Image (cartoon, rainbow, N blue to C red):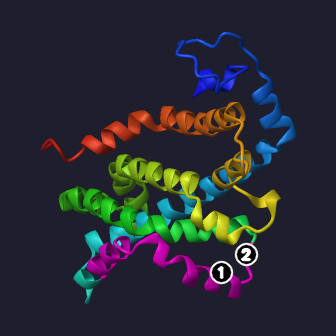
């Protein structure tokens, strides 16, 4: 992808590993003339709101279903899992009608709310396992030391489930960053496009400039790589926690 983005003739059919001539014209066109920086900013805003909203709501919901006993608790868990099985294509029209009625079309906040709803079922189900794995004796010891429930939650329970929160944050980020159908459906104004929708403009009806496509794809990949590098330590511990009995 990077080699094609830097090549002056990406579709020439050469089998060389490195391009015969290197140019930055594709990146200049994508960032300066095509307005791809605006799409990048829109996607970053939507992804940040999605990660923050889904992480907070999933954490509270997971703690509720894992630590408290209430009526229909099992039903709630089954419904959460069932929602995850519904195909996205079956939700496009109902979600569009609901977002339209709420006057949130062409709104990054409205798109973020929809993405939060899509990411929540998996996030709640995953975080529920982390919250349930915390021994009840840890909470009881905090209460004996004089902690209130909010203090116990933020000082004791939250650090223990933080690795799982990182893993769910990665899932929420990827959901918001890569999603195409809903972003295309809800956004009718080009200045509100995300990177997934903005990439489509580089594909012509009869021809496609693959150098520009690969340059835009490279730009899209960089924030994802940066996010993974930022959370990789917490992600690894989150994926492995629970595999070994502590």
Q: Does 180 sit left or right of 82 as displayed?
A: right
What secondary structure is the magenta-colored segment mainly?
helix
Q: Does 13 sit left or right of 147 as displayed?
A: right
Question: Residue 110, percent across and down?
Answer: 67, 71
Asked where in the image residue 185 lies, by quadrant, the reply is bottom right
- 2 and 1 marks in contact (CB < 8 Å): yes
- Say which residue appears at 57% left-offset and 28% top-offset: 1
- Say which residue appears at 48% left-offset and 59% top-offset: 55
Pick whichever of labels 2 and 1 is earlier in the sequence: 1
Range covered by the magenta-colored residues = 76-105
The quadrant the C terminus occupies is: top left
Is 164 a magenta residue?
no
**Residue position for label 2:** 105
Residue furthest to the right in view is: 33
Q: Does 27 sit left or right of 233 as displayed?
A: right
Task: Please give the label number shown on residue 99.
Answer: 1
Q: Dot 1, crowdedness within 10 Å: few (<14), some or many (≥20)?
A: some
């Amino acid at each position: 992808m990077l080699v094609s983005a830097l090549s002056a003739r990406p579709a020439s059919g050469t089998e060389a590993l490195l391009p015969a001539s290197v140019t930055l014209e594709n990146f200049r066109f994508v960032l300066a003339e095509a307005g791809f920086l605006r799409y990048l900013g829109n996607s970053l805003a939507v992804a940040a709101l999605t990660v923050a909203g889904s992480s907070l709501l999933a954490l509270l919901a997971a703690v509720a279903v894992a630590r408290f006993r209430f009526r229909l608790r099992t039903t709630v868990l089954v419904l959460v899992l069932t929602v995850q099985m519904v195909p996205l294509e079956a939700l496009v029209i109902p979600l569009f009608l609901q977002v339209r009625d709420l006057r949130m079309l062409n709104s990054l906040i409205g798109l973020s709310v929809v993405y939060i709803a899509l990411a929540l079922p998996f996030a709640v189900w995953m975080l529920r396992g982390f919250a349930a794995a915390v021994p009840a004796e840890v909470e009881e010891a905090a209460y004996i030391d004089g902690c209130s429930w909010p203090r116990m939650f933020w000082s004791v329970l939250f650090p223990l489930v933080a690795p799982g929160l990182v893993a769910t944050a990665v899932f929420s980020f990827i959901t918001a960053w890569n999603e195409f159908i809903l972003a295309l459906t809800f956004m009718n104004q080009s200045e509100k496009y995300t990177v997934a929708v903005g990439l489509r403009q580089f594909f012509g009806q009869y021809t496609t400039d693959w150098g520009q496509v690969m340059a835009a794809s490279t730009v899209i990949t960089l924030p994802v790589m940066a996010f993974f590098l930022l959370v990789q330590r917490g992600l690894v511990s989150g994926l492995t926690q629970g595999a070994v009995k502590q």
